[in-house]
Every structure is written in structure tokens, then in C-alpha cells.
Amino acid sequence: MDRNENTALLLAVLLMAVFFGALVYSATGLKISLPTCVTDVAPFKQGKIIDKGNNHYEVHLVAKMWAFDPPEIRLPPGADVDLYLSALDVTHGLYIEHTDVNLMAVPGAVNATRVHFDHEGVYDMICHEYCGTGHQNMMGKIIIAKGAVPVAAPPAAAALGGPAQSGEELFQSKGCVACHSTDGSPRVGPSLKGVYGHETDLADGSEVVADDAYLEESIRHPNAKLDKGYQPIMPEVPLTDTEVEDLVAYIKSLS
Ligand code: CUA
């Protein structure tokens, strides 16, 4: 081997040793570790609206498969909004109709902008970054209306009351709405309208009556009894017993 080749090889190996040493030193000596994911820390785990007074609001919007949290934001006209956007799972996008807002929702990062809502109306929030099977249904709403009390709850829920109302809130906030309609129209998953108490065709050719036990099982273990014509793509969402009961109550209310 040529002497110059030897020197180049030796230098390359030395350089690698230096870089590796620097990594080990920064991790152990300087105690530098990977940054914590911002959505692991309290302020950005959950969507919220903070009233700062003078018609000025801080909105924390969290994107996740396949919904925005909060799914609906109600504010009075003239509202100034400081918007902070993050994501819990994969990269999503946010476009707010009739505004200049066009942001990426990136896990581990917060993107911010300021937006002013002069006119009353409904502004759709749309995910414009492909994020999985439920992407095309991932949307939310900003409702600007006179006398609106700043809240982040779906309006129809108030009419139900009790467990069914909590169930509807979960249905929105857990993202179920991205794949299941409540008006009978099929989406990625079957519609939940009129399911309760009726016979359902399963993928294995059998039939089952959609009673409490069946709904509970299908919420906890979505692929245990797969509906005919649908793919086994629904994730197992961690839910407490009460949350499952509330969801069942909500599905019952749709029959
Ligand atoms: Cu979220 Cu597309």
C-alpha cells in the first residue's frame, strides 16, 4: 500500500474515533441527551383555549390520528388568537379556511402563529398532510359567533347529557369520528347509526347482534369481530372502563 493511502486511512480511523469519543463524552460527561418531546410535557399534551382577556385567546391545538384537539373552537367576533400547534403521533398539517393559517403539526415541536377573526362564520380546520387512512376525514371547526362563550366542546353533545354526552365528546376527541360517521354513510369504518340492537354481518361470514357486549368488545379489540367489507385497521385505543361505557351509551343514542 502506498504511504499516502496509509496516512489517509489512519486519519479516517482517527477521525471516527474522535467523533465517537465526542458522542460518548457529551452523553456521559456533559449529560446531554435527546430533547424531550414537547407533547410529553403537560402544556401541549391536550388541546385548550386560554382566555387572556380583551378578546385575546391562546389556543393550544394538538393534531393526532385523525382529529384535532379541540375539534371545535368557539370564539366571539374580533378575537385575536395566538395559535400553538403540535402533533402527538405523526406529522399533520393545518389549514384554516378563509385565513392565512397554513402550518405543519410536527411531533416534538410547536409551531405558532397569530390570527385575527373579524367576521362571524364557520372556519374549517383541515389537515393537509397525508397522515394515514383517516387523513381525508381529519378536520375541525372554528366557529365565530356573537356572544360565543369560548369553549372547546361539540355543540350537539350538550343535548344528550349523561354518559352519552361524555361518549360523544370521547368520540370526537379520540378521533373515532375520522373513520365512523353517525349519519349512516360509510367511511373507512362502518357508520355507527342504527347499529345497536341490529344484526351485523361479520367478515368470517357469521352474524352477530350488536348488543352491549359486542360493542364493548369491538371498542376494546376492534379486530376480534371484523365487520364484513372493512379492513382490520382500527387501532386499539387505550380507554378506561367508564370511557368504554360512555362510548357504548353514545352509540346506543344513535340507534
Ligand atoms: Cu392529519 Cu392528514
Image (cartoon, grey):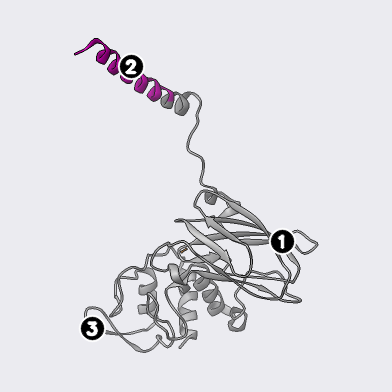
Residue located beneath label 1 in the image: 57
Q: Horizontal and vertical percent for residue 227? A: 30, 79
Q: Horizontal and vertical percent for residue 6? A: 25, 13
The numbered disc on residue 206 is 3
Which amino acid type is marked by label 1? Tyr
Q: Name the foreground residue: 252 vs 86.
A: 86
Q: Horizontal and vertical percent for residue 150? A: 70, 69
Q: Horizontal and vertical percent for residue 91? A: 46, 56
- Which quadrant of the structure image shows residue 94? bottom right
Residue at image coords 29%, 13%? 7
- Which quadrant of the structure image shows residue 142? bottom right
Magenta segment includes 16: yes
Judge whether 254 appears above or below 143 on screen. Answer: below
Magenta segment includes 255: no
Chain part drawn in magenta: 1-22
Label 1 CB sits under 8 Å from any ligand 1 atom: no
Q: Name the foreground residue: 207 vs 21.
A: 21
Secondary structure beneath dot 1 equals strand
Q: Nearer the viewer, mark 1 or mark 2?
A: 2
Which amino acid type is marked by label 3? Ser
Marks 3 and 2, how far apart at CA: 69 Å
Left/right of residue 130 with respect to residue 62 in the rendered view: left
Q: Main secondary structure of the magenta part?
A: helix
Image quadrant where one finds the C terminus: bottom left
Residue located beneath label 2 in the image: 11
Answer whether labels 3 and 2 touch (C-beta < 8 Å): no
Marks 1 and 2, how far apart at CA: 58 Å
